[in-house]
Amino acid sequence: MDPLNSRPDRSDPIWTAANGFVVRDTEGALKLINGGQEIMRVKVTGSQTDGRLSLMEGRIAPGFGNLPHAHGAEDEAFYVVSGEFRFINGDRTFTAGPGDFVYIPRGTRHGFRNLGTEEAKLLVFYTPAGAEEFFLQHGEDPDPSGKLPPVWTAEKFAALGESLDAHHMILLSDGDDWA
């Protein structure tokens, strides 16, 4: 097959349909998670990609680590923009820094922690999309005064149980995850 001669005519929608989109730097819903220790900007949702992909930009407080968990419906990937993170991958851990990409397939226990003394940034991808809806539903909107919401307690996590189930997420912390 000759790829130059088998191209569709320039009137074909493959040439003319502008189906892509751009999301600008400050666009996307900003949500505070767990007392603002994770600040997530939901950049791309499943409704924008026919459920294929979602993307969040996370700013993570120094020393903060989310609870290890697993997704039953989505693969998750991370691109470290700044800072240094410790990742849990099953029963192993490793460190990742700027420019590193981490892929975690669905059904795998994982988590991350900012190892630095300053806020660190990462991009979080889900495929297919869906898990971003948890952040949109349960993240808190920033307070215009800058006051942070309370840190999530065991009671808060217990209250999230049905939503975690609906999003096919299971918390898998043993209380000594980051030792």
Image (spheres, rainbow, N blue to C red):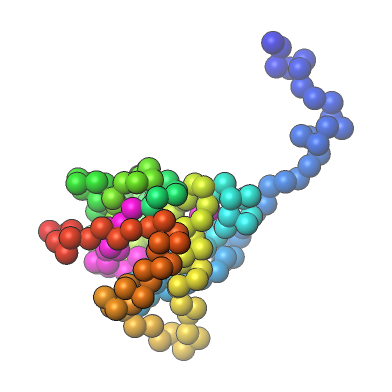
Viewer can see residue 52 = yes
Q: Residue furthest right?
A: 11
- Residue 158, compared with residue 133, is above or below; it is below
In the displayed structure, 137 sits above or below 69; it is: below
Q: Farthest bottom residue?
A: 145
* Relative to 61, 3 lies left or right: right
> In x, y percent, where is residue 159?
36, 75
What quarter of the picture does the C terminus occupy?
A: bottom left
Q: Choose top left, top right, bottom left or bottom right for residue 102.
A: top left
The x, y position of residue 65, in whole percent, is: 27, 63
- Classify 131 as above or below 77: below
Q: Locate residue 96, reporting x and y percent.
A: 29, 48
Q: Which residue is at a point 46% across and 65% down the rendered structure image? A: 134
Q: Position of residue 156 (x, y in %)?
A: 33, 77
132 or 85: which is nearer to us? 132
Residue 2 quadrant? top right
Location of residue 10 with respect to 39 vertically, above or below: above
Of residues 49 and 169, the one drawn nearer to the viewer in this rendering: 169
Residue at the top extreme of this rendering: 1
Q: How many marks?
A: 0
* Image point (30%, 60%), residue name: 171
Q: Nearer the viewer, residue 164 or 112?
A: 164
Closer-to-camera residue (130/30): 130
Please provide the residue range marked out in magenta: 54-70
13 with respect to 171 (left or right): right
